[in-house]
Amino acid sequence: MAILKTKELKKMSKEEREGKIKELKMELVKSRINASKNKGARTRDIKKIIARIMTLNNQKQNLGVE
């Protein structure tokens, strides 16, 4: 999975972002299982992407955009 940039996330609808969060959370669970093999680098990246999406959702909610 590629790292999602903020520009890409802004283009998504709220429903697409919510679906992406669910998908990433499942991937996070799988990554934690395999963390001993890859030293947790992937886990950290997934968490950053989830935080980026949630931040964008909160900003849009506070502005009343969506």
Image: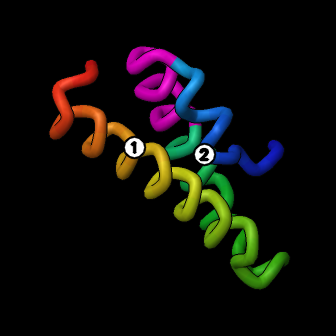
Determine whether 55 is above or below 66 in the image.
below
Q: Is residue 56 magenta?
A: no
Q: Which element type, helix, strand or loop, lies under badge 2?
A: helix
Name the kind of residue labelled 2 in the image: Thr
Q: Which secondary structure dominates the residues rendered in magenta? A: helix
Q: What's the magenta region?
A: 13-23
Q: Observer-nearest residue: 33 or 24?
A: 24
Could you tell me residue 51's position as x and y percent?
A: 44, 57
Q: Which element type, helix, strand or loop, lies under badge 1?
A: helix
Name the residue beneath numbered marker 1.
Answer: 56
Could you tell me residue 49's position as x and y percent?
A: 57, 53
Could you tell me residue 25's position as x and y percent?
A: 50, 45
Name the kind of residue labelled 1 in the image: Leu
Q: Quadrant of the C terminus?
A: top left
Q: Observer-nearest residue: 5 or 15?
A: 5
Q: Could you tell me how far apart the alpha carbons at marks 1 and 2 are, in whole angstroms?
A: 8 Å
What colour scheme does the image use?
Answer: rainbow
Q: Quadrant of residue 64?
A: top left
Could you tell me residue 33's position as x and y percent?
A: 64, 64
Query: What residue lies at 55% left-to-right and 42% top-to-bottom?
Result: 26
Query: What residue lies at 53% left-to-right and 31% top-to-bottom?
Result: 10
Query: What residue lies at 26% left-to-right and 43% top-to-bottom?
Result: 58
Closer to the N terminus: mark 1 or mark 2?
2
Q: Is residue 49 left or right of residue 61?
A: right
Residue 6 is marked as 2
Disc 1 residue crowd, few under 14, some 14–19, many 20+, Cα 10 Å? some
Q: Are marks 1 and 2 in contact (CB under 8 Å)?
A: yes
Determine whether 9 is above or below 47 in the image.
above
Disc 2 residue crowd, few under 14, some 14–19, many 20+, Cα 10 Å? few
Q: Observer-nearest residue: 38 or 52?
A: 52
Q: Is residue 18 magenta?
A: yes
